[in-house]
Amino acid sequence: MEILMELHRRRPHLFWIAFILVGGILGIWASQNGWGLRILIVPLGSGALLVVSLIMVLGALAGLASTLRPAPIVLDETGLRLRAEGINQLVPWASIDALILEPRHGASDNSSGPRLLLVPSADADLGTVAEYQNKVDGRPSIILLPIDSLRASQDQVVQALATYAGQRFINGASDSAVETESSASAT
């Protein structure tokens, strides 16, 4: 029996999706029954209400569809099953030089958590080019996803990567956490 670890994306808040969906449906009904949309004192009419309501319904349906997406990364003894960054295939461990957990720094980043990078081997054909120069060891890499976009905690992800990837896994985030703690205690 093959043991594997699936790294799923975080689920959106279903309460808000349901709230927006119901609001959109009620808006469509209201626009068909003579209600109109007003912004402050400017009446925009029932057509504008219909358009806004349709956008709400489509957004809620897109949120629901995102809950049904398969796991972007599945780890097992044979390799990684990737559904991220243009890669939709099983990548054997022989095609992977390294999996790097890289810390993110800078104001341009939307999240403060580390991200998972894949360094393909020289002969690997993943269907995409490794264009990103990682900050841990400088090799060309592919950014797979930010760790904080996953349901699993960072510690669980690190443990799974260390278990399955073995020596291929480089935890660059732990080094930066130690540097940050030591610099904070020095001040």
Image (cartoon, helix red, strand yellow):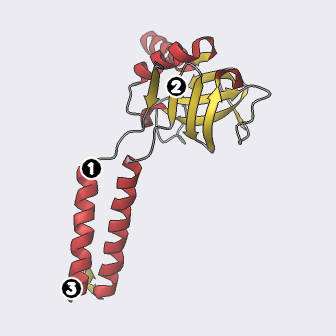
Tag 2 residue: 75
Identified by mark 3, the residue type is: Trp
Q: Earlier in the sequence, mark 3 or mark 2?
A: 3
Tag 1 residue: 14
Q: CA distance from mark 1 to mark 3?
A: 28 Å
Corner quadrant of residue 95: top right
Q: Earlier in the sequence, mark 2 or mark 1?
A: 1
Is 55 displayed left or right of 138 in the figure? left
Q: Nearer the viewer, residue 62 or 38?
A: 62
Residue 90 locus on image (x, y percent): 61, 33
Identified by mark 2, the residue type is: Leu
Q: Secondary structure at mark 3?
A: loop
Residue 169 locus on image (x, y percent): 59, 17
Q: CA distance from mark 3 to mark 2?
A: 53 Å
Which callout, 1 or 3, points to the residue nearer the camera?
A: 1
Which callout, 2 or 1, points to the residue nearer the camera?
A: 2
**Residue 132 vertical position relative to residue 27 in the rendered view, above or below:** above
Q: CA distance from mark 2 to mark 1?
A: 27 Å
Tag 3 residue: 35
Q: Secondary structure at mark 2?
A: strand
Residue lying at the far right of the rendered structure? 123
Q: Work out whether residue 44 can be spotted.
A: no
Q: Work out whether residue 94 can be spotted.
A: yes
Mark 3 and mark 2 residues within 8 Å of each other at the beta carbon: no
Decide: few, some or many residues near mark 3? Use Cα within 10 Å; few <14, some 14-19, many ≥20. Answer: some
Residue 19 locus on image (x, y percent): 22, 59
